[in-house]
Amino acid sequence: MSAPSLPAFCLRLVRRQLVLAVRRPVEILNPLLFFAMVVALFPLGLGPDPKSLASFAAGTLWIIALLSNLLTSDTIFRGDYDDGSLEQLLLAPQPLYFSVLAYLGAHWLLTGVSLALISPLFALMLNLPLEALPALVASLLLGSGVMSLVGGVGAALTVGLKRGGMLISLLILPLYMPVLIFGSAAVRAAAQGFPAGPQLAILGAMFCLAIALAPLATAAGLRISIDA
Amino acid sequence: MWTFFHKLGSPPWLYAISGSILKYLLPATLLALGVGMVWGLLFTPPDFRQGDSYRIIYIHVPAAAVALAGYYVMATAGAISLIWKMKMADIAMQCCAPIGAALTFVALVTGSIWGKPTWGTWWVWDARITSMLILLFLYLGVIALYEAYDNKAAAARACAVLSLVGTVNIPIIYKSVDWWYSLHQPASIKFTGESSIHPSMLYPLLLMIAAFYALFACALLLRMRAEILDRERRTGWVRKLLEADAV
Amino acid sequence: MYFHDLHSALHMDGHGAFVWAAYAITCVVLLLIVVAPLRRRRRLLREMSAEARRQRGVPTQGSEA
């Protein structure tokens, strides 16, 4: 049997991750449930006045998306590290850059994309103006991609540690901050009737930069974690 | 050139040379710091808009500048240790983090104390202050990651990767002043073009910036010497050093 | 010197408390980052020479600090 070509190999990895997730649907639903619950917390904490909720909605939705992404990023490599298949991946002839990209892409599809698609529902509950919905979905799609990629670096560096959960948030939250700034700025601009294009363009640039660099750092981090 | 580079990787050589550098550098640094502080506090005229509270500039600006530069030093040392697997570079990287965190803390605290009489509030969420806070988090993240690993060689490599990733944040810190409208005044020292600060205020500021850089170097070398001794405690040259010390 | 007397230097038109507090905090932190490694080095040297003396079988003298 010959080794599969690179694209086929990556596609197989993505499919494997998706199949694993579909077999345990709780793993997909948990971040969404978390999102819904935290959305419910904000009116309870800030008061139910629709006007004040609308003014906070952009930032609130983005912060919740960021947190649910953060909570799931710890699990990207955890299972495969525990059962040893990560070590096999490092020994595989395919470049680690692309296999890591496949892992992170699968994570993005499972958490980021599903969150972005369901976010208009919660946006309406928080009284966000309708005009801002396209900007919200677009900014969450791009931004969660950046966050999955950056979160992968943190996950790779902490996967070998027993108590990695808290540490990973310390490591990658500072790196999430620029994404949060431009993501929520895009939604706020759209809500006030301005074009959200510039902010989305900057998010797109961050996404490209993250695709180019983050898998390299993630691959280096995985090698360190496996060696240690 | 390369022999110098290789010598840098040798613990006894670095220990000896840093000792003889520090003998002169440390007193000179402390003297410069003392002179700069007295000069800035007592011998400069007050600013015509901010009055005397502007005197905090002589510690705030140098601390912020060196805290930023310290991150570059750390990332560079991290890159060297990843590429050439040089032990001294990962000691240097690991020793940069606490010093940089301390200086960032100083910049934040003095900035906040300066903000109270000038803006009437302790804390403003403007771009540069926020970026400094993020810088502090980045430093603390590196320290936390280092402490979390039991295997110190792996810890150093993991921190090197993290600090290189963190350098993505540094251009954002610099650019943030242009990106966001803020209360913060634009940078007032430019080495190209005319400076908007009067020479009688500029010279003590330059002295303090130089002194803070020197202090960073001193603190880094001191930490590295202690760390080298700790890691090399079983080797021959440390025993010889002890015997020479005992005599 | 810019100020006429000690009192005006301490007071600085009402900003004195801020300025002097900022300088004091800075001095404390700077002293800490220089003194901490010096103390650590001294402690290490003491530990190691005590260890070396034990290994040579020479009875330790003086107090253990």
Image (spheres, rainbow, N blue to C red):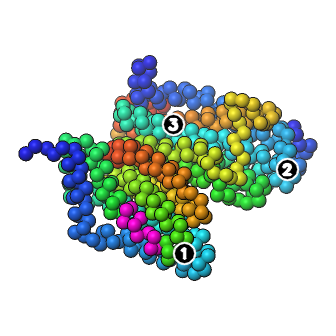
Point out the stretch of residues depicted in magenta. A112-122
Question: Which callout, 2 or 3, points to the residue nearer the camera?
Answer: 3
Question: Which callout, 2 or 1, points to the residue nearer the camera?
Answer: 1
**Whether residue B74 is visible:** yes
Q: Decide whether residue C61 is among the magenta residues.
A: no
Same chain under badges 2 and 1? The reply is no
Left/right of residue C36 with respect to residue A206 in the rendered view: right
Instruction: Identify the residue at horizontal 64%, vertical 46% (top origin).
Output: B177
Left/right of residue A130 with respect to residue C22 in the rendered view: left
Mark 1: secondary structure: loop
The image's mark for residue B73 is 3
Report the amino acid beneath label 2.
Met
Instruction: Identify the residue at horizontal 81%, vertical 35% (top origin).
Output: B198
Q: Residues within 10 Å of mark 1 (few under 14, many from 20)?
A: some
- Front one among A124 and B238: A124
**Main SS category, magenta section:** helix
Left/right of residue B55 with respect to residue A151 in the rendered view: right
Q: Where does residue B241 sit, x and y in percent of width and height? A: 44, 30
Above-or-below relation of A19 to B27: below
| CB under 8 Å between discs 2 and 1 | no
The residue that label 2 is drawn on is C12
Q: Residue furthest left?
A: A1
- Front one among A50 and B123: A50
Instruction: Identify the residue at horizontal 85%, vertical 40% (top origin).
Output: B45
Mark 3: secondary structure: helix
| CB under 8 Å between discs 2 and 3 | no
The residue that label 1 is drawn on is A127
Q: Pinpoint the chain carrying mark 2.
A: C
